[in-house]
Amino acid sequence: MDFVQDIAGFLRGYWGLWLMLLFVGLVLWTLRPGSRKKYDDASQIPFRDENGDAPKSGRGSGPESGPGSGKE
């Protein structure tokens, strides 16, 4: 049982280092070169319609936002 307590004491002393390494690892994983398309697709999920299609252009470009539509 002393072995487990020794390991626990060692890890307690370095919890800040472990958390910092975890944070840096997560940031690097998110910003890796091949992940841009994946995260761009995921960022459009709230804007998709029932067919799963995301809008092609910016805000206010749909047919319901033209002149005379009542939306300004």
Image: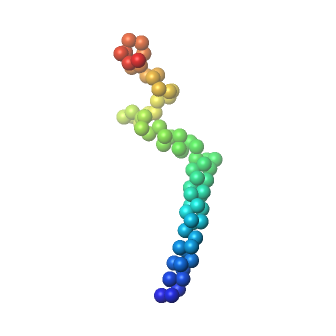
Give the residue furthest to the bottom: 1
Q: Residue lying farthest top?
A: 68
- In this picture, is 52 found above or below 26? above
| Left or right: where 71 falls relative to 42 | left
- Which quadrant holds the C terminus? top left
Q: In this view, does 1 lie above or below 71?
A: below
Could you say where residue 58 lies in the image, as x and y percent from the top left? 50, 27
- In the displayed orientation, state which residue is furthest to the right: 33
Q: Position of residue 22 (x, y in %)?
A: 56, 61
Q: Residue at x 61, y 53 (%)?
A: 28
Q: Which of 35 and 7 is in front in this view?
A: 7
At a point 48% along the width and 42% down the height, the residue shown is: 42
Q: Is residue 4 above or below residue 12?
A: below
Horizontally, residue 35 falls left or right of residue 68, namely right
Residue 37 in which image quadrant = top right
In percent of width and height, residue 69 lies at 37, 15
Q: Which of 24 and 31 is in front in this view?
A: 24
Residue drawn at point x = 53 percent, y = 78 percent = 9
Measured as percent of width and height from the top left, residue 23 is found at 56, 57
Q: Which of 24 and 48 is in front in this view?
A: 24
Question: What residue do we see at 46% from left, 22% from top?
Answer: 61
